[in-house]
Image (cartoon, rainbow, N blue to C red):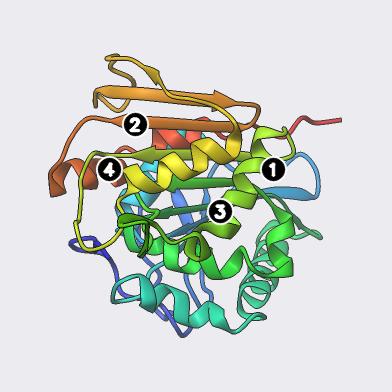
Amino acid sequence: MLAVAGAAPATNALSPQPAVIAGVTELPLHVGRLFVPTNCRPAGSRVELLVHFHGHLPLMVENFLKAGRPGALLVLNFPGLSAAYAKPFQDTNEFSRVLAETQDRLTKHFGRNTELGPLVVSSFSAGFGAVREILQQPAAEAITTLVLADTLYAGYVTNDGKRAPDPAHLKDFVRFARRAADGRATMIVTHSQLVPGSYASTVETAEVLIAAAGTTRRKTSDLDSTSMTLESVADRGGFHLRSYEGTTGQDHMNHLRQIHAAWQLVPRERKP
């Protein structure tokens, strides 16, 4: 699967030298890098957590601050392609452990009991390997929003001489798309027009999600806040798809560079 040039290596032990990035405080974790904006002051006990798989740390923090998200950002990077992201989460308790440690660190940081929520899970490119494993687990029920930024690939199956994305690789994403279309969650999907050839592209997997959500594409040629040109959009309930022009590796990378636009579509929790 496609890889990100310059992606940071995984942090699999407590980092003695947290990243120094303006505007955020890094809280040490055994897995991943946890960042809290310096101006983050939760009004209650709940703190939104955005968990992102695959992306250069400073770029992720820059986009997080630009998106104006109200909580914390957890970035997990593993060297390799989608299999490298899938492997740690084949342990069905790993994601729950990561969340538990994150909650503990935030509790200590804010000096009071802190609960995680809403829970946003996001991925770019090869990062979908982790998401695919997590969606099969009970912990997935806590995910309120799923953001897929030019990331969802699949193997092919052949039916009647025609290739199609393997349903087994997409079944849990399909289930989430239906949940979002029904208004029980939010799913934000972006994709380029890049075709890898040997496996199903993000264009082809998007078609599967659109069908599952019970909606259709609406053609457009608008420019949005990403400065990329929209090719089509599809919306139903909490399901939102944005298709952008571009067939090159740089076009693919723009979905990471401009991921703040997708994160801005994540609904904010209503305070009581």
Neighbourhood count class around disc 3 (C-alpha, 10 Å): few under 14, some 14–19, many 20 upward: many
User: Label 3 vs label 4: CA separation?
Assistant: 24 Å
**Mark 4 vs 2, N-terminal side:** 2
Q: Residue at x 71, y 43 (%)?
A: 42
Secondary-structure class at tag 4: helix
Q: Amino acid at mark 1?
A: Arg
**Mark 3 vs 4, N-terminal side:** 3
**Which disc, if any, is residue 255?**
none
Secondary-structure class at tag 1: helix
Closer to the camera: disc 3 or disc 4?
3
Residue that mark 1 sits on: 179
Residue that mark 3 sits on: 173
Q: Residue at x 40, y 70 (%)?
A: 18
Residue that mark 4 sits on: 257
Q: Amino acid at mark 2?
A: Ser
Residue that mark 2 sits on: 243
Q: Residue at x 24, y 23 (%)?
A: 229
Q: Determine contact: label 3, label 4, CB under 8 Å.
A: no
